[in-house]
Amino acid sequence: MPAVFVPHGGGPWPFIKNPFGDPEELNDLARYLRSIRSLPKETPRALLVISGHWEEPVPTVTTAEHPPMLYDYYGFPPESYTVTWPAHGEPKLAAQVRQLLESAGFKTAADPTRGFDHGTFVPLKLTYPEADIPTVQLSLKRGLDPAEHIDIGRALMPLREEGVFIIGSGMTFHNLRAFTPQAAPVAEAFDQWLREAAVLGEKERNARLVRWSEAPGACLAHPREEHLLPLMVIAGAAGPDRGAVAYNGTILKLRLSAYHFG
């Protein structure tokens, strides 16, 4: 199975009447997210999603057989709070994720009640609208250490050989106070650096991602890096597979990109 990092956009944007942003830009992103379904050569047995909207003291997995919806946004129209994506959970996969991480030296935890946050259900409702593939969500580890998250991904790499499609969901630009076209030069500079780093060989790619904060515009693009850390997990899970820039678009003229490995 491949491993991918995708931008999930702002809030429930595909499912409301007047989304935030230019319709042409959003249509491009929606088309890309729909296209991911065709990336695996075989139907995945399960999805493992790392969302930028969940942090815990230790890596934590959802274990509910029927995860609820978690509408972790506010100020959107009423219809955005009725969106459903009723994918089943996969407790066996959750247990396997914990075992792999603990074998790599990480303490882990399980959450039997947490639902799918919008970093999971928004993009995947476009990719898999039938919600017919079991899905487990994995948290980030509080502290947001990039090297640790690469190690988390590396520990999960064997899952790819077992039919698990690993998806990191975040944004390559995430500064809500600067989400205006005026920030376009910052977004472009940082995104160009990421595009160059992602296609390098494993050792150099991961070394650069650990030092992401040294990139041009990095701390303006990410005052807090939780939306970038899912990329680190995917880079770790990629192993020696080189990355490819699979999507390079804009929202409000701010550059965003997606990466596929394998």
Image (cartoon, rainbow, N blue to C red):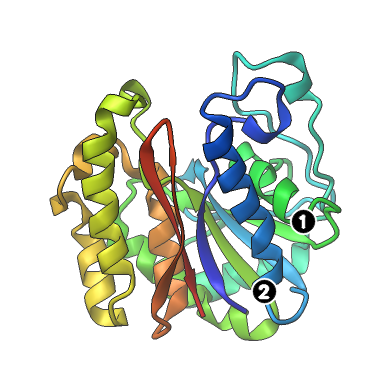
> In the rendered view, would you say 251 is above or below 59?
above
Of the residues shown, which amino acid type is indicated by label 2?
A: Val
Tell me what residue is drawn at x 23 percent, y 58 percent.
193
CA gap between label 2 and label 1 equals 15 Å
Residue 172 placement (x, y as % from top left): 38, 47
On the question of residue 102 being in view, the answer is no
In-image side of 226 versus 261 (left or right): left
Q: Depth check: 254 or 109 in front? A: 254
User: Percent position (x, y) of residue 260?
Assistant: 49, 69
Amino acid tagged 1: Tyr
Rendering quarter of residue 163: bottom right
**First in residue order: circle 2 vs circle 1:** 1
- Vertical placement of 95 versus 57: above or below? below
Give the x, y percent position of residue 124: 69, 51
Disc 2 on helix, strand or loop?
strand
Does the image show residue 129? yes
Q: What's the residue at 28%, 71% (across, down)?
A: 206
Task: Tell me the residue that label 1 is attached to.
Answer: 128
Label 2–label 1 contact, CB within 8 A: no
Q: Where is residue 184 in the image (x, y as percent from the top left)?
A: 28, 35
- For disc 2, the marked residue is 164
Quarter of the N terminus within the rendering: bottom right
Q: Residue at coordinates 52% horizontally, 74% vertically from top-left?
A: 156
Q: In this view, does 47 lie to the left or right of 230?
A: right
Q: Nearer the viewer, mark 2 or mark 1?
A: 1
Q: As rendered, which of 132 and 38 lies closer to the eye?
A: 38
Label 1 crowd bin: few (<14), some (14–19), many (20+), radius 10 Å: some
Question: Residue visible at 69% across and 55% down?
Answer: 34
